[in-house]
Image (tube, rainbow, N blue to C red):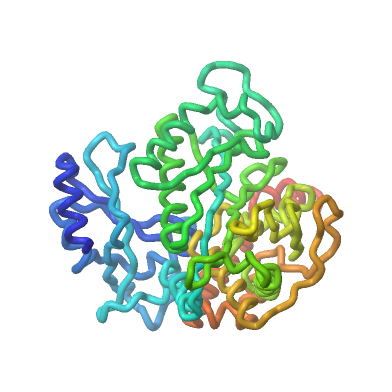
Amino acid sequence: MSFQDEARSFLAKHSNVDAVEVLTTDINGIFRGKQYPASGLEDLGTKGVNLPLTALLFDAQGGVPGEVFEPTHAGDPDNMFIAIPGTLAPVPWSDRGIAQVLVEARSRDGAREAWDPRAALIRVLERFANDGLTPVVALELEFYLLDPVSRPPHAPDPPSGVPPLKGPQCLSMEAFHDFAPFIRETEEFAATQRIPVTSILSEYGDGQFEANLQHNADALRACDEAMLLKRAVKEAARKRDWLASFMAKPITSGTGSGLHLHVSVLDKDGSNIFAGDDGETLLEHAVGGIVASLPQSIALLAPNANSYRRFQEGYFVPVQATWGENHRSAAIRLPVADAANRRLEHRVAGADACPYLAAAAILAGIHHGLENKIEPHKRVNECEPIGTAPPFPIRWRAALDVLEQGDILQRYLGEEFISIYLRTKRNEEARFHAEVGDRDYEWYLRVL
């Protein structure tokens, strides 16, 4: 079905819709967009909408310095953003008839723009398709529910008025039921927008939850769903005057929030290549490729200053490229599964990572390992001490340096994308560390 046909069918079914929000994802995994009259909905599939291409490069504050994109894009010209078929849906949290649709950047000749995170993932998926392979991915997103005005932030009190629970309360059904109306409404929002949420559970931090998505053989759609789920979670929280945050480390003493990706790979017949006689060898090659590419992937998996506060020992967050069977301290975990569902779980990315770029980096590593038959170092067995493994950078500038020096992601995601990403993030890193913050005054002002 063309987008025009999809739009006509949608408007016939949702006659109350009078506006549409067009949404594109920047390199931080933040939606940017505009609201348009629904009368122009059908044209979004052909004429698209005009947005500045630099919107894809915004920092978390919604700005981008001119020196990042000049002189090639001096004057910040508009670009065409075309609607993505299958992403049109109602906005159930609005009190008026509003729809939303995802859009992607296109050049005048219709080609995808190199700066678009979605396009970067597509380039990686094309490498699999050329080999007759299809990655299957499932994303898990951790987040905190927080009081929006408290500093430092803390979880909101249960709406029922019962005393709040304290401590991690991991997998607590008490904590789950304290916030059951929020969880139920999030699931309802997701169902309305065709987001396949499989479960939401109480995680390891005070006020922390995890939302899991269904495995999907369309990795691009799986990342679309992750972005849409983040929005639905935030809106369900906003209705209750709470803040839902996917910040990697919002609370100093609390557990960080991660973005975990489960990945298997199908052959042209639809069979899992990690199963069968050669499956274990291929799985090890995939792991070997991830380990080889992980140091240069960190700048994408941990995209901002706060991301690196999550990398701390003792919080089930990996700080080196370990891998092994059923081991939650490992960077790459092999979950318990039957042969048909044999897969790996990548546990390094923060919840603040852009899903498209996290998936692109991880899948690039897997393809690199399969193509070059890379053997990984020794695995960690279940219940064994984690031991040591090849390191990866856990400081922002070091991660950017390693990405610039590496060549694996340059080949998979495109040199132009990596170049503009590095320029943007180096600028942000320099500005962040140039600012004198409260800790400077607390530690140094009087004693020095």
Query: In percent of the image, x 48 and y 70: which residue is there?
Result: 269
Q: Is residue 180 left or right of residue 51?
A: right
**Where residue 81 sits: x, y (%)?**
29, 67
- Residue found at x 76% / y 63%: 322
Q: Is residue 266 left or right of residue 248?
A: left
Q: Which quarter of the image is occupied by the N terminus?
A: bottom left
Height in image: 417 above or below 442?
below
- Residue 379 position within the rendered picture, expressed as x and y whole percent measured from the top left: 79, 64
Comparing 370 with 39, the one in front is 370
Residue 290 in view, yes or no: no
**Residue visible at 40% across and 42% down in the picture:** 190
For residue 83, side relative to residue 319 (left or right): left
- In depth, the one of 5 and 278 nearer the eye is 278
Q: Relative to residue 240, is residue 263 drawn left or right?
A: right
Q: Residue at x 58, y 39 (%)?
A: 209
In this view, the residue farthest toward the front is 277
Total marks placed: 0
Quadrant showing the C terminus:
bottom right
116 to 212, vertically: above or below? below
Q: Nearer the viewer, residue 68 or 309?
A: 309
Q: Position of residue 102 (x, y in %)?
A: 33, 58
Residue 342, visible in the rendered structure? yes
In this view, 158 is above or below 91? above
Q: Residue 383 in the image: x percent, y percent?
A: 83, 50
